[in-house]
Structures are given as C-alpha cells and as structure tokens.
Image (cartoon, coloured by chain):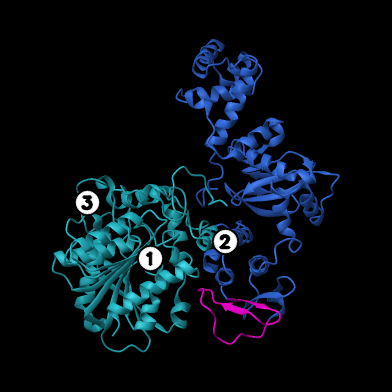
Amino acid sequence: MQELLGRISRLDPSSSLGLRVIACFDELIVGNVNTRALLAAAAALAGCTAGFRQVDGRRAMRVTPKGQIDETAAPPQRDDLVVRAGEDLIVWLERAETPGANDAIILERLALSIRIRHGRGPRGLDDRRHLGVLTDRVSSPEDRLDAAGSLGLVASRSYRVVAAPLFAVWEARPAGPEDVIATRFGPIHAVVVPEHHEPFRASPCGLGVAVPASDLDRSFRSALVALRLCDPPREPLVAADAYGGLIDLLAEVDEAQHAYADTLSVVVEHSWALETVAALVTTQTVREAARMLNIHHSTLQARCDTLKANLGYDPLHGFGRTRLGTAFLLHRLNRSNVLDMPAPGST
Amino acid sequence: MHDGTRTDVPRPGFDAELRAGLAVVGGMFPPTITPDLIDFMRISYASPPMAEVFDERRIDVTEVSFPGYQGADLGAAVLRPCDAEGARPTVLYAHSGGLMFGDKFSGVDLVLDWVTRLGVTLVTVDYRLAPEFGDPFAREDMYAALEWVAARAKDLGVRRDRILVAGASAGGGLAAGLALAARDRGGPRLCGQVLDYPMLDDRLLTASTTQFDGVGVWDRISNQTGWQALLGDRCGGDEVSPYAAPARARDLGGLPPAFIDVGAAEIFRDEAIDYANRIWQAGGDAELHVWSGAFHACDIFAPHTSVGRAMIRTRNDWVEKVLAD
C-alpha cells in the first residue's frame, strides 16, 4: 500500500495522503479488527515493519508490510518513530532510513486504533476523536461540551461545521479542528470554524448553520444536507443558511434513511420540468421566472397548469409554493451524486 | 456503520480490513472505468520499477522477444531463481488490467513465491492490449507465447511435461482460453490452470455482475468497457470465440486441473463459480475458493490483510501440489 500511496501522489500531487491514512484507520476502527490487522495496515502503509508492546512486556507483536509476523531480531528502537498509545502501550515503525512523509500520521492513527482495540477507549486521549463526539447526534450535550472544550472551542460562541468529501478541491483551507467522520455517505472531512470565518473556497462543500458548541451535531447534519445539494461546477459550495429552518427538516428526513416519496417524480418526464421548478422556487413572480427561463410568460403559465394537474396542487399559491420548494430540494437530495468519487484525473 | 455508498441492491459487504484498503486503492483504481479513463489507467496501473524486488529475492530476469500473433515481435520476461539449473517446472503468466492496461509485471509480486520457493521458471508476456488491438490479438499472442515456450523449452529451462498457465482477472480469462485452445488444437500439454478471479464472460448476465455498481474494484461498467474494447460490436453477440470469453465454451471436458479463486463481493463471483461447476459436470478437476468479503483482486491491492494472505497462501499451496519437484 505504501507503493499505492506513492502512485496516488504521483498521479495527483495535491491529494492529501494523510486523509487517506485517516480514512483507512477509521474503517479499521469501525470494523473492530484485531491487533495484527492494525499493525499490518500500518506496516503496509509505511513499507516497513510495525510493532506494538505493552510496557510491562507481557505482549508484543511485530508485523511486516506483507502482514506476516516478523520473526527477525528487532532493530534498536528509534525515538522519532515511537508513539505512546496510552499509559501502558507503545507502537513503533522499524525504518532504517529517514522517516517517511506519512510516518507521523500512520503512527498517530495506529496508536489510537490499538488503544481502542485494547479497551483503553478513545476518550480523553486523542483530540482528533473529539470531533466525532462533537458531531454525533447520540452523544449528550454535556459530552459535546467536554469535547468542544478539549478542542479549544468556547461554549459561549457560535461555530459552523464545514463538510466535504475527501476528494474535494480546496482553495484556501479554513482553520479549525478537523477530522474524518464516518457517515452513511462515506467518510466526510469535517472542519469546525467560527460563525464568522475567513473566506475559503472548496468544491464540493457544505457549510452548516451557526450554532453553540453544544449543538454542533446539528450544524454537521445541516452541512451534510448542504453538501449533498451541491452541483459543481455550477454550485460548488452550498451554505445551509440559504435554506433557513427548512434545512433542519431536510436533515431529519435525510437521517430517517427510509426512501421518502419524491413527489417531483410525476413531473420529471417533462424535459422542461426541473429547470422550470428551479426558476419558480428562486423567483417571486411568474414573469420573473419566465425571464430567467427566457420563455414567454404564457408558455410558463401553460407549464404551471401542467404542473398543477400532475402534482395535485397549485404550485403558485399559498402552501403550494412551499410544497414545491420542499419537493424540489428533496428531489435534489434524492438524486445527489456529488459524493460519488469523481474519476481520478477529471478534476 | 456504513459501507461508503448508498444502494438499493442487496450485496455482501466488504471485509473490514479490505474496506480500509479501499480507502487507499480508490485513489488510483476507481470502481467505475469508462473508455475515457483508459489513458489514466495505463499510467496508474503501470507496474512500478521491479529491479530492486527481483534483486532482493535473488530472481534472475531475462527480457526476451518472441513471435506473437501474425509473427509480430513481442516482449516477455523469463524469471528464474538465480541458482536455477536445467529444466524447471514452468508457468506461463498472463497479467491483469482489464485487457486494456497493465504490463507483464503488473501484479507479478504475487507469483514470485513460485519462483523463489518452488524454483519455477516463470514467463510473463506483454500481450497486445485493446482497444488498439481487439480480439484475437491478446489471446493469440498468449497462444503464440505458449507454443514458443514449448518449442524453446531447452534454451529457456522449461520442463515440457510440467507447464502451467496462470493469470489474474483479464489474465485469468486469457489463461482459461489458453487451456481451451491447447486442448482443441492439440497444443502443448498443460499440467494445470490457475484462474484468479477470472474475466470469463462478455455477456454480463450474472446476478453478481449487477451487484457492485460504483463500489470496490472493477464494476459492471468497467467490465463492459473492457469487453467492448476487446470485442467491439461482437460483444455479447453470437460470434464471440470461447478462447476470448471462456464461459462461452460448450465443452469444459478434457481440461487440465483448474484452480479458481474469486471474491464473494465482486462481479466475477457467479461466472467463476459456474465455470468450476461446469468443469465438474464434465468430469474434470477444479478447486474453487470463494472468499468472503473480498473485492476484485484484493490480494493484489491489499496482500497484507488476513483475506489477502489466505488467498495467496491457498493458491501457493495448490501450485506447489501440481508443480513442485
């Protein structure tokens, strides 16, 4: 895998190998794999033997990049390639030459995953894990505040979560605590930024609503919805703020995981349907929408009549407008493919 | 917790270690390969420099040329242990790469143990690639290599009575096709065929073909891209040779013993199982391993994992059984 990492950075020098290492160990932690598997992954990523030992010497294991138990004599330990994994465990890499560019992150993630596997638990031991607690809806507000404190976030201030896939392209990175969070849409790169933050650009990227530190799980969910509404290159970054309270409703529906009815499916057979709905929900009047679509307003009126007949409500009046807007966003979420890994070399 | 994608199609999940491997592999081998990605794949899947590995493992490598299909001058490499003498058991190897990319050293790491531990002479071939060279170039280049290996047995250090064909993925399909062609044409007698997750069927009809869209390595679209590149308009039709798509062979009797392995979580699962089953029905010898949680070619991309190691070990044991002195 070390060789694969090398290939990836040759193919795309801007790619973040550190994030791939993190995503790799996240899968191992989630998959609850054993010590040998963790050491094998570290060794394979580093291209040299990886080891672990309990400080009292009761258990030790060294594994080669091929996943075999290393039976050769261990070389003298190098101080720069040893990491403590809690009070009584250490992990290391056995490399003769200069440390590799990814050694630090590999050791950090190996230490974390070994600690968890050996029941030491992640809490209080690794700052980066706090972000998982902070963005998880099932953790309590108290736990989230603890985690926020450990990350240097202040309880009385407001923050947002920035969410992006690992393959996102960034121009100027926002500063703040960050980690890769496993979600049902795959690993997501999350960064916590102050409510009023320095400008940055990323594609695709969702910007969550501003919340107190104890509610950052809600901001993360809204950021995920915003991210999934992105449509690069036309709309590379979506801010949840653009949809106000609606974003929370969308996030709830999105979380529910069961297939919700896509009420626009009855009209999408009309080739004009989606752009017409998009114009209607982003303008005030039929005339304005017609101008945006560059069609005569009587043509648009005819389309609206068709929509009304197909949908079973008038999309231009009362709650009909709201229903149409909500249906439009749900339809986009349902069809979102922004998190599908783009073909390498296509960006 | 999640398997990385949304899906409506039920499918077996990937093993946790392999899922972790995919977080890395995905950067150079996308799940879905369309024709516009062929150029990218030729760069990303090109074999890395191997000289150091061969050196460390004390393998002697001779670059040779041989007459391919229609006499074209083609390249191959002959790998032997440094201290080898005389005629050795021999493997003719067809590399992976979807018929469109890869080279004679792609994935060859996994078969070097045969050279170092069993003292095998391994001949690996740069057969010609699609779409520039459609069917029958790849398979007839391989067949020409087989005839050349048998004819030059003495110079190459080959035991004529112990030649095995092997290949992975597209190469596995080519190896299966070689065994069929050698049987039908009265060619060199083979002592075995190793078909690693072989690409056998251009018709894309099996259930497993449609189970893994957009995930893992080599999905339905990638497979379609490969077969289309090889066969063009003939793809899926009535005119496809069983030497190109061995699943189309009517008769699987009289073949050398087969070793077939495949992942439970890959599109080739059903065609590999079916091929083994049809060999048994025809009274032949086949050993089939279906690896739970395995994506396509996971032993090439993640040999350090417990599934990867088990696949490699099991295959090596079988090769030792049929090939070793």
Q: Does residue A1 appear to the left or right of B77 in the view shown? A: right
In front of the other: A248 or B115: A248
Q: Position of residue B30 (x, y in %)?
A: 48, 53
Mark closest to the chain's N terminus, 3 or 1: 1
Residue that mark 3 sits on:
B240
Q: Nearer the viewer, mark 2 or mark 3?
A: 3
In the picture as drawn, the residue positioned furthest to the right comes out as A156
Dot 2, crowdedness within 10 Å: few (<14), some or many (≥20)?
Answer: some
Give me the C-alpha separation between circle 3 and circle 1: 25 Å
Q: Which mark is residue B103?
A: 1
Q: Amino acid at mark 3?
A: Val
In front of the other: A298 or B194: B194
Question: What is the chief secondary structure element of the magenta stretch?
Answer: loop
In the picture as drawn, the residue positioned furthest to the top comes out as A298
Q: Is residue A140 magenta?
A: no
Q: Which residues are drawn in magenta?
A: A49-77
Q: Residue at x 68, y 35 (%)?
A: A248
Task: Tell which chain the image draws in cyan.
Answer: B
Query: Chain A is shown in which shade?
Result: blue
Q: Position of residue B29 (x, y in %)?
A: 47, 57
Give me the C-alpha separation between circle 2 and circle 1: 21 Å
Q: Residue at x 35, y 76 (%)?
A: B317
Dot 1, crowdedness within 10 Å: few (<14), some or many (≥20)?
Answer: many
Q: Amino acid at mark 2?
A: Ser
| Badges 2 and 3, same chain | no
The image quadrant of residue A94 is bottom right
Residue that mark 2 sits on:
A9
Q: Which mark is residue A324?
A: none
**Element assignment for label 3:** loop
**Element assignment for label 2:** helix
**Element assignment for label 1:** loop
Q: Is residue A51 magenta?
A: yes
